Image: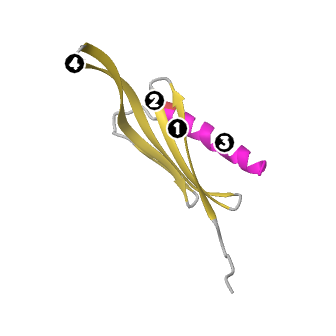
Amino acid sequence: MFTEESRSIVVAGSAERGDYKYKVNYNLSGNNLTSLHCNVYKKVSEEVTTSTGTQAVEQETYVGIMFQESGNKQFSFPQDTDITPHVAVFETVLTEIKAGLVCL
């Protein structure tokens, strides 16, 4: 007979701070956080010409990625990027997710 040995759950969400959007995906095995990936995008407004004139359209430009996996945290951004505010958001999201796991 079939015996389930493990089950994982994938969760997707997002956070926003200022001009940045953080798209988050994480995996759970039971109540254990096994990995968390956070893609960082900058919201940019761009003028687009249409048949009725110009209008502002919001675009998202990829900035970098932050993740925690196998007990390690890694951050990958272009070398001239100040990562301090992004790391702060990452740590806040991580704390909120872990706090939610205690309630499960």
Among numbered discs 2 and 3, the one appearing first in the sequence: 2
Judging from the image, what secondary structure is the residue with disc 3 in? helix
Disc number lying in front (1 or 4): 4
Among numbered discs 3 and 4, the one appearing first in the sequence: 4
Q: In the displayed orientation, state which residue is furthest to the bottom.
A: 1
Mark-to-mark CA distance, 2 and 4: 25 Å
User: What numbered label is drawn on residue 49?
Assistant: 4
Mark-to-mark CA distance, 2 and 3: 19 Å
Among numbered discs 1 and 4, the one appearing first in the sequence: 4
| Residue bounds of the magenta highlight | 86-104
- At label 1, counting other C-alpha atoms closer than 10 Å, the crowd grade (few under 14, some 14-19, many 20 or more) is few
Which quarter shows the N terminus? bottom right
- At label 3, counting other C-alpha atoms closer than 10 Å, the crowd grade (few under 14, some 14-19, many 20 or more) is few
Judging from the image, what secondary structure is the residue with disc 4 in? strand
Residue 73 inside the magenta-drawn segment: no
Q: Residue 11 appears at what percent x and percent y?
A: 58, 50
Identify the residue at image location x=23%, y=19%: 50
- Above/below status of 104 relative to 78: below
Judging from the image, what secondary structure is the residue with disc 1 in? helix
- At label 2, counting other C-alpha atoms closer than 10 Å, the crowd grade (few under 14, some 14-19, many 20 or more) is some
Among numbered discs 2 and 4, the one appearing first in the sequence: 2
The residue beneath circle 2 is 20
Is 104 left, or right, of 22 in this rendering?
Answer: right
Mark-to-mark CA distance, 1 and 4: 37 Å
Residue 87 inside the magenta-drawn segment: yes
